[in-house]
Image (cartoon, rainbow, N blue to C red):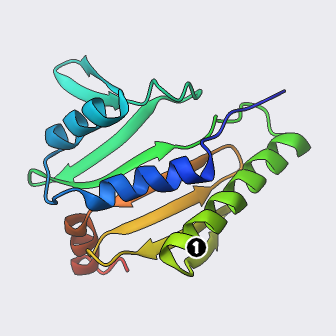
Amino acid sequence: MSWKAMTPAEACDLMEFWESEPWPLTRDQAQQRAVEWFGWTVEVEKGVSYLMNTVSGFTVADVSTIGSRGDLSYIRLDVADTIREVSVESRRFLGDAFALMVREAETRWGTPSMRDFAGTSSATWDTASGARISFNHALKSLSARFETPQGVELDRRAGRR
């Protein structure tokens, strides 16, 4: 079995793109930027638009874009195929891809805050703009999350970090 993953540079470049955007942005504005810059698509279902990373060809193409009061709070996407059946090989694949992404990110953003919780490992960096970047490794997936400065502030006010 073979799986696909973004290269570490590609995943970090993607996070740096979002870091460089002029926040705050609405969900629609962020989705439009993803379409223009990455060639992603927007699908509409029951009047709701969903951002899809159809370019990478991963098993899960949807990109979560969650906002609060008009401003986007975070963007979450898979940076590798989702594993259907866990095996020694799939665990090695995701673990190696995670380690390489963290290593690349360390050269750009310094030492991350590492967390392990309930079978998920995460590496997180707080950025100069007030945003937060994370790579998350679970048993069946590898994802990246960009929390906007507004999303980080909402978490802070709610007592979550």
Which of these two is toward me, 90 or 129?
A: 129
- 70 is higher (above) or lower (below) than 1: below
Identify the residue shown where x is 71% and y is 35%: 83
Q: Quadrant of residue 58?
A: top right
Where 153 sits versus 71, above or below?
below
In the rendered structure, the answer to whether residue 16 lies left or right of residue 30 reads right
Residue drawn at point x = 73 percent, y = 32 percent: 3
Q: Position of residue 67 (x, y in %)?
A: 20, 51
143 in relation to 81, above or below: below
- Amino acid carrying label 1: it is Glu
Left or right of residue 79, residue 132 in this image: left
Q: Circle 1 is placed at which residue position?
A: 106
Residue drawn at x 24%, y 36% is: 31
- Where's the N terminus, which quadrant? top right
Which percent across, then down, holds residue 157?
Answer: 21, 79
Tally of numbered tags? 1
Q: Please name the residue shown 9% across and 50% down the image.
A: 70
Q: Residue furthest left?
A: 69
Q: In the figure, 8 relative to 82: above or below?
A: below
Secondary structure beneath dot 1 equals: helix
User: What x and y, as percent, mark residue 44?
Assistant: 24, 19
Local crowd size for mark 1, using a 10 Å CA cut-off: few (<14), some (14–19), many (≥20): some
In the foreground, 154 or 93: 93
Q: Is residue 10 left or right of residue 102?
A: left
Along the viewing direction, whichever of 91 and 4 lies nearer the viewer: 4
Q: Position of residue 100 (x, y in %)?
A: 69, 59
Instruction: Give left or right: position of 107 versus 65.
Output: right
Question: In which quadrant will I find the C terminus?
Answer: bottom left
Q: Residue furthest right?
A: 88
